[in-house]
């Protein structure tokens, strides 16, 4: 839109504006539709951004950790543990390796087996936590060394279950953006229908204006202005209440996981402010196309 079109939208024309009813069904429908769609778009945007953060966090955190599991007879457990730690400490790319204590292993198993699990009487493997350096390590080479020096050791670099989680988060983020596109398309369709209904309801007035010399573009401009402002206003109201609703959601918490981190963070709170502008632009082009087409059909 150029400067002249923008001025026409803001100032308008009193004579042309009379062809568009200021209130009524079409006015309420346009404002409600734009507001509802903007409200939903805020949540779809929050979902998309949250899953993006989740995928990045999983990729960064899980990629730097691994677990070594040692299953050995009781008389060989300590020897294999020392040998495994020695192998890990001398492997390039590993920042640290630490054997978990009985209390830590019991805490890991407690959600599954309950408190007070007697680890001493159960054949539970010894776990070693591995923290990688930024460049990582050669998993294939490490497995070969462990197989030769620590027969009871099994290396788990979390690849099997890390990649599906990251892939699922990425797809959910894509689904959020697709939802935003569908919401926008639905808003355009409903505003188009509302504009067509207003044009049909004012067919008699439009014929009179044509008789006195009014051009189609002059008549259409009034519809475009009125419906663009309605779409912009409705989208602004919906965005405001959507941001308030997102603000009231629980803040991010490690224990709560993904469900407590659906809000915006930092400068991301500026992103929803674009939604009203998109709503206004969508209403402008949707109404302009519908008005010119309907006026052409009525001529």
Image: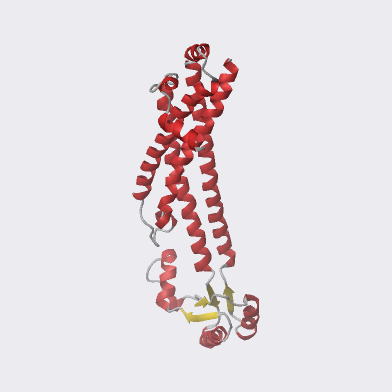
Q: Nearer the viewer, residue 276 or 112?
A: 276
The number of numbered badges drawn on the structure is 0
In the image, what residue occupies the spot 53% across and 77% down?
133
Residue 18 lies, in percent from the top left, at 42, 19
Q: Nearer the viewer, residue 13 or 36?
A: 13
User: Measured along the vertical axis of the image, is residue 92 above or below residue 62?
Assistant: below
Q: Nearer the viewer, residue 8 or 293?
A: 8
Can I make out residue 262 in this image? no
User: Measured along the vertical axis of the image, is residue 282 above or below residue 70?
Assistant: above
User: Measured along the vertical axis of the image, is residue 6 above or below residue 193?
Assistant: below
On the picture, is 232 further left or further right than 89? left
Q: How is the image coloured?
A: secondary structure
Q: Quadrant of the C terminus?
A: top right
Residue 225 lies, in percent from the top left, at 45, 29
In the image, what residue occupies the spot 40% across and 42% down?
239
Residue 8 lies, in percent from the top left, at 45, 31
On the picture, is 242 further left or further right than 61? left
Q: Nearer the viewer, residue 114 or 18?
A: 18
Can I make out residue 237 in this image? yes
Residue 90, picture quadrant:
bottom right
In the image, what residue occupies the spot 42% across and 75% down?
104
Residue 212 lies, in percent from the top left, at 50, 12
On the picture, is 272 further left or further right than 297? left
User: Measured along the vertical axis of the image, is residue 72 above or below residue 117?
Assistant: below
Residue 275, picture quadrant:
top left
């Amino acid at each position: 839109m150029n400067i002249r079109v923008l001025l026409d939208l803001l100032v308008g024309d009193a004579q042309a504006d009379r062809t568009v009813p200021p209130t009524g069904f079409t006015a309420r429908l346009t404002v409600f539709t734009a507001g509802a769609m903007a409200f939903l778009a805020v949540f779809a945007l929050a979902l998309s951004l949250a899953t993006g953060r989740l995928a990045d966090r999983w990729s960064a955190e899980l990629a730097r950790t691994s677990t070594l599991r040692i299953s050995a007879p009781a008389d060989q457990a300590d020897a294999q543990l020392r040998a495994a730690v020695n192998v890990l400490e001398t492997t390039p790319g590993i920042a640290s390796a630490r054997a978990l204590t009985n209390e830590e292993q019991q805490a890991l198993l407690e959600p599954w087996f309950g408190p007070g699990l007697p680890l001493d009487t159960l054949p539970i493997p010894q776990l070693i936590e591995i923290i990688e350096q930024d460049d990582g390590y050669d998993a294939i080479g490490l497995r070969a060394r462990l197989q030769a020096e620590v027969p009871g050791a099994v290396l788990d670099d979390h690849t099997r279950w890390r990649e599906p989680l990251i892939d699922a988060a990425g797809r959910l983020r894509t689904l959020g953006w697709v939802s935003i596109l569908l919401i926008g398309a639905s808003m355009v369709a409903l505003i188009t229908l509302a504009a067509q209904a207003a044009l049909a309801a004012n067919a008699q007035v439009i014929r009179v204006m044509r008789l006195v010399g009014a051009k189609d573009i002059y008549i259409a401009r009034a519809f475009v202005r009125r419906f663009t402002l309605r779409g912009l206003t409705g989208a602004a109201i919906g965005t405001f209440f959507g941001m308030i609703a997102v603000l009231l959601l629980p803040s991010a918490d490690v224990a709560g996981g993904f469900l407590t981190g659906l809000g915006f963070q930092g400068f991301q709170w500026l992103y929803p402010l674009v939604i009203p502008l998109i709503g206004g632009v969508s209403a402008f082009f949707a109404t302009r196309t519908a008005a010119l087409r309907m006026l052409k059909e009525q001529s």
